[in-house]
Image (cartoon, grey):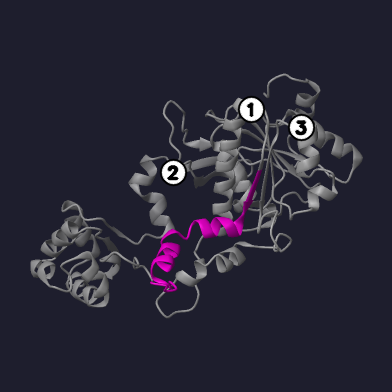
Amino acid sequence: MRPSPAPAAGPLTGTVVVDLSRVLAGPFCTLQLAELGARVIKVERPGSGDDARHIGPFVADESAYFVSLNRGKESIALDLRDAGDRGLFERLLARADVLVENFRPGVLERLGFGWDAVHARHPRLIYASVSGFGHTGPWAQRPAYDLVAQALGGLLSITGPVGGPPVRVGTSLGDLAAGLFAALGIAAALAERAHTGRGRRVDVAMLDAQVALLENAVARFAATGEIPGPLGTRHPSIAPFEAYPAADGPLVIACGTDALFRSLARVLGAPALADDPRFASAAARNAHVEALHAALAERLAARPRAEWIAVLDAAGIPCAPIQNVAEVLATPQVRARNMIVDVDQPGVGRFPVPGNPIKLSDTPDPPTRRAAPALDADRDRLLRWLDDGLRPPD
């Protein structure tokens, strides 16, 4: 038997989360709770477990995808159609503070574990549901994946090159945003329960999360009536704010004020650009963004990227190379902030995963994380814990 997985220290230490979710949105939510100190008990299907266990890439027969999302959790396999397993699940709920699930609306209701039934039996339990379209509205029963959420939520319509085909954001933002909003809702419900003693239902939809992230696009449409479209790396109302070609590769430059643009013009050896009527103000630069791009690109193309970044940094102008993932993992600032940590996964060895971006005072942020569990690996320990009654979680 593997050693008892002591949860990470954090503000949620002592909080028990029963995780009935799978694949990405729900597990990403519970991963954030685990990183903040919660004990996460993952309830999986007997035999096959979470679908993510079977999604590549694989390292020594372990799904790297599953490990990155489920590190530090415990696993028990339960069939909620089996009377004995239903009883065990009920006992877990009695000891838990939070239940997280991402079934399609109606599935858990048919099994007797919907919100109304569970709340009546366990009024202190916070019940969080993450789904494609939420538990209300005409589309509640429709299935959804990240691509569907990005499409319906407008993200595909504003991502990609000008005049080009739709481009999916390169990470699963539909799932990830829903997971983050669910974690925020759970944290708020836990804070409220400390005063009221009662749990709440947290209902988060992937589509809702995408709409919430449209910020500037919705504001532009409301203000102008114009439908936003893709702009490549450009900002819709700030210039210069995009990628430019240096002699050996692209870099990005972002000047959000007139003072920064004057500094940029001076660094580029073209101070007159700041006095050009087309570029003298933020509104003028945005109105003549293509001419501005051409003027800046002509000068930037004369020197290598690293040289430009050195002089731009020295002048306090926000800029960066466009890094690939390998370069991100090697970035000194990323390393200094402990944003790449290692999981010591049995059968795999040291495996790098993203760290916790929430840095809390007086809370450890170790360079390693606990392993992801094998399917049903923690059954015996969890049964002993349940049998011990109200003893605090080990």
In this picture, residue 238 sits left or right of residue 167: left
Check if mark 2's residue and mark 3's residue have beta carbons within 8 Å.
no
- The structure residue drawn at horizontal position 70% and vertical position 42%, both measured from the top left corner, is 374
Residue, disc 1 = 196
Task: Tell whether position 262 is magenta.
Answer: no
Upstream in the sequence, badge 2 or badge 1?
1
Q: How crowded is mark 2: few (under 14 residues within 10 Å), some or many (20 or more)?
A: some
Can you say which quadrant of the picture contains the C terminus?
Answer: top right
Task: Tell whether position 214 is magenta.
Answer: yes
Per the model, the C-alpha gap separating discs 2 and 1 is 36 Å
Report helix, strand or loop for mark 2: loop
**Observer-nearest residue: 358 or 341?**
358
Per the model, the C-alpha gap separating discs 1 and 3 is 14 Å
Q: Which amino acid, by three-letter code, is at mark 3?
A: His
In this picture, residue 100 sits left or right of residue 317: right
Camera-side mark, 2 or 1: 1
- The structure residue drawn at horizontal position 67% and vertical position 38%, both measured from the top left corner, is 200
Q: Which amino acid, by three-letter code, is at mark 2?
A: Met
